[in-house]
Amino acid sequence: MNPLNPMHAPTVLASLFAVNLLSDPVSVTHYLVVGAILFTAGIVCMTVKRNALGVLMGIELVLNGANVNFVAFSSQYLQGEQTASIGLDGQAIALFVILLAAAEAAVALAITLNFYNNHSTVDIDQADDLKG
Amino acid sequence: MTSMETASQLSMLLGLAWLTPLVAFVAILFFGPRMGHHGKNAAWVSTAAIVASLMLSLAAMGTWLAAHPVQGVVHAGHVGHAEDSHAESHEAQRPAAVHAPVAYSGDWYTLYQGGNLKLTIGWYIDALTVLMFVVVTCIATCIHIYAAGYMHDELHDVTDHEVHLASGTDLHRPGRFSRFFQALSLFCFSMLGILIAGNLAMVFIFWELVGICSWFLIGFYYERTSASNAANKAFIVNRIGDFGMLIGLMALWGALGTLHFADSVERAPDGSMNVRQGLLSLVRPAEGGHALRVPDGMVKFAAAAEVAQISIDHADRPRDAASELASRLDDWRSMGMGRWLLFIAGIGIFCGCIGKSAQFPLFVWLPDAMEGPTPVSALVHSATMVAAGVYLVGRFFPVLTPDVLLVIAYVGAITLFIAATIALVATDIKRVLAYSTVSQLGYMMLALGVGGWVAGLFHLVTHAFFKSLLFLCSGSVIHACHTNDMRKMGGLAKKMPWTAGTMLVGCLAIIGAGVPFVIGLSGYYSKDAILAQALAFSQANPTHWILYAAVAGGALLTAFYMFRLWFLTFAGVPRDHHIAEHAHESPTVMVAPLVVLAVLAVVAGWTFPGGFGVANLLEQARPAGTAEATTGGFVFGGITIPAEHESHVGPIHVTATLTAFATAAVGVLLAAVMYLWRFVSPVVVAYLFRPVYRFLAGRWYFDELYHAVFVVPVLGIASLASGTDRGVIDRIIDGIAWTARQLAGFDAWIDRTLVDGLVNATAHATWNAGLTLKQLQTGHLRQYVMFIVIGTVALFVLASLLFRCSLAG
């Protein structure tokens, strides 16, 4: 089986996750996939957006992608035989992350506002004042 | 009053008299410059101390006279007293001669005691000590008062016209009034210390202290090259004599183990009282009638080999060894063992006296010492310090063998003749007096050498009075004329009647003027005594007739040069009108001491009713065993020292007195012919005897001789040593330094290139790395995120490839 052959992709994925996403019941893996997609979307957003607010949104996506994972791992309904739940810890961490994200967003928005006041723009490519 | 009480009272009085000037010295040393304006009151502190000393000395004299009234016998030349009484007094002296003189001694403080050796601060008081205390403090008092006036220039800033600075101006310096009196007080303390000293070690200590005071005072104007040279010269020449003195001290110390003059009683550890014999009784033991003999210690010292042999032979029986030793001592003594040691001890001590009393060949320092202020010349270099040598010979007289005495006599004769001849042609008024001092000291030494113990010390006392008088008069003249050159003076008698009169008294006293057999000035008695003793000695030892000739000739020369001085200074017409116009009589504070000293110079030789007189007082202190004529001589042999009182009997005395009178009269007449009446011009005489005149004016070329014989070789050796120092030792040191420098240079190169290079290279590399890495930090946020993503993915890929882990399974 050639992992690079597109025809074999489902099989490859099945072998990678040891489950078939489309046929198996909803499990942690599905949540992880959603989290990964969110995370990746966030990263892409951070990378390609030149608007500071867009970047901040990307950050929110990344954090929420991670949050999905925490919540999934903490759920007692999703656990299979092999996986052990981390219990309420995961949900607590998720709450912390939300809190931190809010705080971070406040700080970041304040920085952005200041930056705008000084440079009349929110283009982060212009924000290289602290470069070495 | 018992003898014990007298002793304690005398030692207390004289001890206080001795220490009072020290108190003044310490006070001035610490507070001198703050005593009034420019230290003006230092003079009063110093003078008060010496006056207190004088009072205490007079009290001591009173105590002494109360305890030991002087005998009414006539002695030492007072022929005015009945001639026939001599026979009785002569007889009366005989039994007295066996007795030792009255002397008290004791120790105040023991410096060191260990084994047989003992060093103490002690006292030895006899009539001589008491007399000398009175004389020294009396003269010192006069001179302190005089100096308070004479030194007034030092009360404000002084411009010394004899010192030219490199800037072309004359030296300007603060006055040194208090320092002068400080040194004067220290000097008095030191001099009195010599007088009261109970042992030779203490004498030596104060001997050196006197030397250093002399150095301070001669070099008082130390900015003047001549003064500082003179001070050094005096000090160094005295050290030469003191070296001999040290040898003498070592000879005594090593052989006899004591330097005490007198016996002392001390408590042994077991409680018994031991008599510790002093030098005087060791050399002249009482059991032998005080006859001079070589002490046991010196005999044993000389016979060290035999003593060792005896103790080896009797190693098992020490008692036998001791008895055999005792039995052989007299044999050894008769073989002459130890004689040389006694001779060397005597000559050694005399060497110190040669230096201090300016005897031939060490007299060259005294004339140069006149660089000091005139009161110093009067006190230190005529009346007291130079007398210390004569005093010590007198004190040490019993220990001197006839050989040593003969040496002393000849040294004195040579000194008196040389100095008198130089004084004939000197033109500096102070130098005439300085050479006169040397000459008179020669007289004293000669007198002691020919056995005239009383005569020599009598002359010491009288000379102290009239020579200090003469010096103070000369100081008064110099004060008025501002020059020392007699050729520029003349006719000053009208301007300065008091000075002229008192100086005439001094001149008459020094030449021994008087009416023969009736009365005279102080010098008349002392000089006659010396002449008589020299005559007696010459008669007893016809081969040594030249000693008498020297004394007689010296008397003539003395008369000539003293009156030459007086005529040149005071008589005739002024030769320098500028000086004569400005001359004036000195202030009262300077004249009063002159008058006091003049009176003393007249009466010091008299014997007053009741027998009181210097000569009789000295007779009380005559050392044991010296009243008798002695024959002997361990080294030269065949010398007879005549008994002193024999020189006062008729024929000898008459001859001596007439000789003294005739020579003095001839001397004065010659001086008058040449310098008063001008019948013969001194210039013509000088021209007629050109070579002699030049030789004398050149001061016998002693300074040149010493310069060529001693100074030049010493300087040569010194320059050789400094050449070695510079050429060899410095080269080696420089070479070592050069090598070290080269090594250090190499070391520095290593440090700079290798060590510093390594450090710098590290720093450089870090710097460059920083520069390179800096470029990564672009400030582009999105780029950073890309880095993070790419890096994370790369890490995952790497981890998955390396660890082959599988998720969920």
Image (cartoon, rainbow, N blue to C red):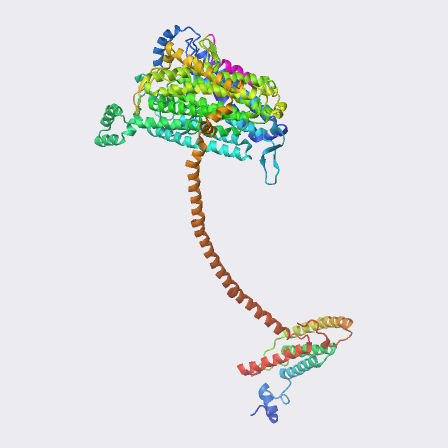
Magenta region includes residue B398: no
Vertical placement of B56 versus B362: above or below?
A: above
Q: Is residue B672 left or right of residue B322?
A: right
Asked whether B604 falls inside the magenta stretch, the response is yes
- In depth, the one of B531 and B316 nearer the eye is B531
Left or right: B310 with respect to A22? left
In the image, residue B152 lies at what x, y percent? 61, 26
Q: How many marks?
A: 0
Q: Nearer the viewer, residue B20 or B252?
A: B252
Answer left or right for A6 relative to B518: right
Residue found at x 39% / y 15%: B532
Q: Which residues are magenta?
A: B592-609
Residue A33 lies, in percent from the top left, at: 64, 84
Of residues B422 and B341, the one nearer the viewer is B422
Residue B644 lies in what quarter of the image?
Answer: top left
Q: Image quadrant for the C terminus of chain B?
A: bottom right
In the image, residue B458 lies at what x, y percent?
A: 44, 17
The answer to whether one can see residue B344 in this image is: yes
Q: Position of residue B360 (x, y in %)?
A: 41, 27
Q: Quadrant of the N terminus of chain B?
A: top left
Q: Using the rendered image of the protein, determine whether residue B100 is visible from the camera's viewpoint.
A: no
- Principal secondary structure, stretch drawn in magenta: helix
Q: Decide: is B265 above or below A110.
A: above
Foreground of the two, B353 or A82: B353
Q: Quadrant of residue B39?
A: top right
Of all residues shown, which one is farthest toward the bottom?
A: A7
Horizontally, is B24 left or right of B540 in the view? right
